[in-house]
Image (spheres, rainbow, N blue to C red):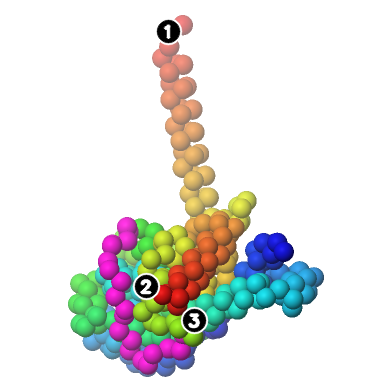
Amino acid sequence: MSASNLHKWATLPDPTAADLARAATGDVDAFKTIVERYQGMVYSVAYNVLGNHTDAEDAAQEAFLRCYRKLPQYRSEATFSTWLFRLALTASVDYQRRERRRPEPVEVPDLAGGQPELGDGITAGTLTAALHDLPDDYRVPTVLRDIYGLPYQEIADLTARPLGTVKVMVHRGRASLRLRLQAEREA
Amino acid sequence: MDCSYFCERLNQYVDGELGYLDVAELQGHLSFCPHCAAELAQLSELRGALAAWGEAELAPPPGFAERVAAAAALEAKPGEATLERVVHDVLDTLDETLGRIPLPGGRTIPVKNVLGYGIAATALLIQLERYLRRTRELKPS
């Protein structure tokens, strides 16, 4: 995955070599330090893919546990955030394929940083609600493509769907989101 | 004017999937069609909003790191070889080494799955062949 797909996450400082080495030998306190540093990134990925807080927390926890198990295999060729970001994406998509999504009312997530500039008349609330209401089949590929910039082929591999189907789902997801945001604006 | 031909290509255009001749044709149309230009502007605005949303850091629920650490404490230590981990590691290594085979329609399948299905099918055929041979041998002549 190219660095451009990672947005600002690729710029997060890596954990110290000492923390990584201690966590890789099973030191839970050192691992917790890593979790505290990256929890915003992993939780954001899980929430955007899954669209609700309960599932996002489960998937984010699963991503960190995969990270814990695989720590001895981490090689510093990729930055730690790139490696963990990839684990978070895979864990979230696997979770979505495995579990039935729990119905949960839309709730605008708390933002750890400032409010992002989303454009004229688009707020975090309207965008979250529009994404929440998309069917899973449309939301997941659209999120992977337009929020995280994954190539279509990679989305097809991750979601185990044909390339053409993934493209159609993204196009329909975009169309639904545009209509929804336009309706919100006119309301 | 029927713009459906061009509207259908806007997604490919923003994804950078059109050839240069198609791009030139679409851009020519956009220069005099306010409807399609507005469609493109909306699509670009949506993609900009989604990309900006991807940069937002959402706050995990309170106590999340503590819960993850508690769950990690219940796990075997990272280096320890449990049966489940060995199986997972072997499967991951096979995936990374062997890659995926493209199928018609753009779907891909891991090579290790194809090998697994092949081995399972061969074992089934051998069993079937044994069963049929035994049935023939036991049949009174």
3D distance between C-alphas at marks 1 and 2: 74 Å
- Front tag of 1 and 3: 3
**Residue drawn at (43%, 11%) of the image:** B139
Which secondary structure, mark 1?
loop
Name the subunit of mark 3: B
| Residue assigned mark 1 | B140
* Amino acid marked by disc 2: Ala
Q: Which mark is residue A173?
A: none
The stretch in magenta equals A99-118
Q: Main secondary structure of the magenta part?
A: loop
Looking at the image, residue A162 sits to the left or right of residue B90; the answer is right
Q: Which mark is residue B49?
A: 3
Which secondary structure, mark 2?
helix
**Is there CB contact under 8 Å for labels 1 and 3?**
no
Name the subunit of mark 2: A
Same subunit, labels 1 and 2: the answer reads no
Same subunit, labels 3 and 2: the answer reads no
* Amino acid marked by disc 1: Pro
